[in-house]
Image (cartoon, coloured by chain):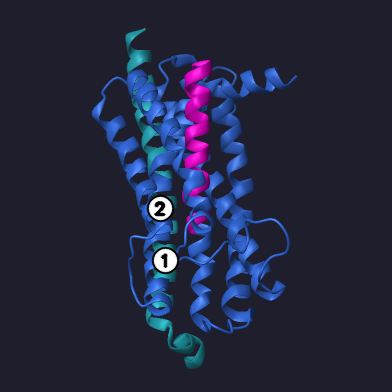
Amino acid sequence: MAWVWFHRFGSPPHFYRLAGRLTPWFAWPAALLCLAGLIGGLGMAPADYQQGDGFRIVYVHAPAAWLSLMVYVVMAGTAAVGLVWRMNVAYAVAASCAAIGASFTVVALVTGMLWGRPMWGTYWEWDPRLTSELLLLFLYLGYMGLRNSIDDVGRADRASALLAIVGVVNVPIIHYSVIWWNSLHQAPSVMKFGRPTMPASMFVPLLLMLAGFTAYFVALLLTRARGEVLRRERNAHWIAEALGQGPGCKV
Amino acid sequence: MLKFLQMGGYAVYLWPSYALTAAVVALNIYWARRSLHGAQAEARRRLATLKAAS
């Protein structure tokens, strides 16, 4: 049963249609979740006893940092699926991840710098967390650069998949860097076992923002991957069907 | 309102963070839509060529 689902998802026309139908189901909840998270985070959460109102940067910094890591794992995971099962749709999804992930890595780094300046007294420090996050940006840029430098799509897919998979080693390093090393960066307050270290009025808006950004990413990825799948397709029959021009298609 | 905008003296760090995030969120939506619409336009052209050839 699972395999039927897997193969159906791997079929480009099916993916194209399904992704198109699913996109609004992620886009609208994303907008609502982020709106609720912003109202809660900027308007209702109390100021932090140490960081005052400055802590509110967390409501954009943490979701961006979460996306930077999650997108990378999705990219490496789908690239691995593409490599193992030679699945074109999986490669298309992986290729669609890179620019999204890179842009949110930049957001995580810059909002982190803007947070660090008043709290640590410096924009940048070669600290394990900051350095490993910067390395993540270079991995994304390397992935995109490698794809751009190879004309043949199949070869670009395979080579960039290997790079993505090797680079996944950096993800746990980023996550655990604040625990393994003595870092300037504060310890995790969400992604950990046990109770959160924040009161609910601060924590709930953060969860809403994290959920909202995740849904937003799914909607973005589906949109981009549809374009990527269509660009790779050479079969006239299903292109016509996808564009609503095929025989027996509703226009 | 002014007190809200001042963010306890952190306005100069906080609002640029939010502005950058909002800009990247909006840009990603624009890029994704442009990429899909570009692929659809290209597919339409390719389809027309394929139909003309057959």
Q: Earlier in the sequence, mark 1 or mark 2?
A: 1
> Which residue shows up at 50% across the image and 92% down it?
B3
Residue B46's x, y, as percent?
35, 21
- Label 2 resides on the chain identified as A
- A196 vs A231, left or right, is right
Q: Nearer the viewer, residue A84 or B50?
A: A84
Q: Colour of chain A?
A: blue
Asked which secondary structure carries label 2, the reply is helix
> Which residue shows up at 52% across the image and 32% down it?
A77
Q: Can residue A237 be seen here?
A: yes
- Tell me the amino acid under the disc marked 1: Gly
User: Outermost residue, right direction?
Assistant: A1
> Which residue shows up at 57% across the image and 27% down it?
A15
Question: Which residue is denoted by mark 1 in the rendering?
Answer: A112
Residue A128's x, y, as percent?
41, 56
Q: Tell me which corner region of the image, top left, top right, bottom left or bottom right, holds residue A167.
A: top left
Query: What are the residue bounds of the magenta stretch?
Result: A64-89
Asked which secondary structure carries label 1, the reply is helix
State the predominant SS element of the stretch in magenta.
helix
Q: Is residue A78 magenta?
A: yes
- Indicate the chain coloured cyan by its letter: B
Residue B9's x, y, as percent?
43, 88
Q: CA distance from mark 1 to mark 2?
A: 11 Å
Q: Are marks 1 and 2 in contact (CB under 8 Å)?
A: yes
Q: Is residue A220 above or below residue A156?
A: below
Q: Nearer the viewer, residue A183 or A81?
A: A183
Q: Is residue A129 magenta?
A: no
Question: Which residue is denoted by mark 2 in the rendering?
Answer: A133
Q: Tell me which corner region of the image, top left, top right, bottom left or bottom right, holds residue B26.
A: bottom left
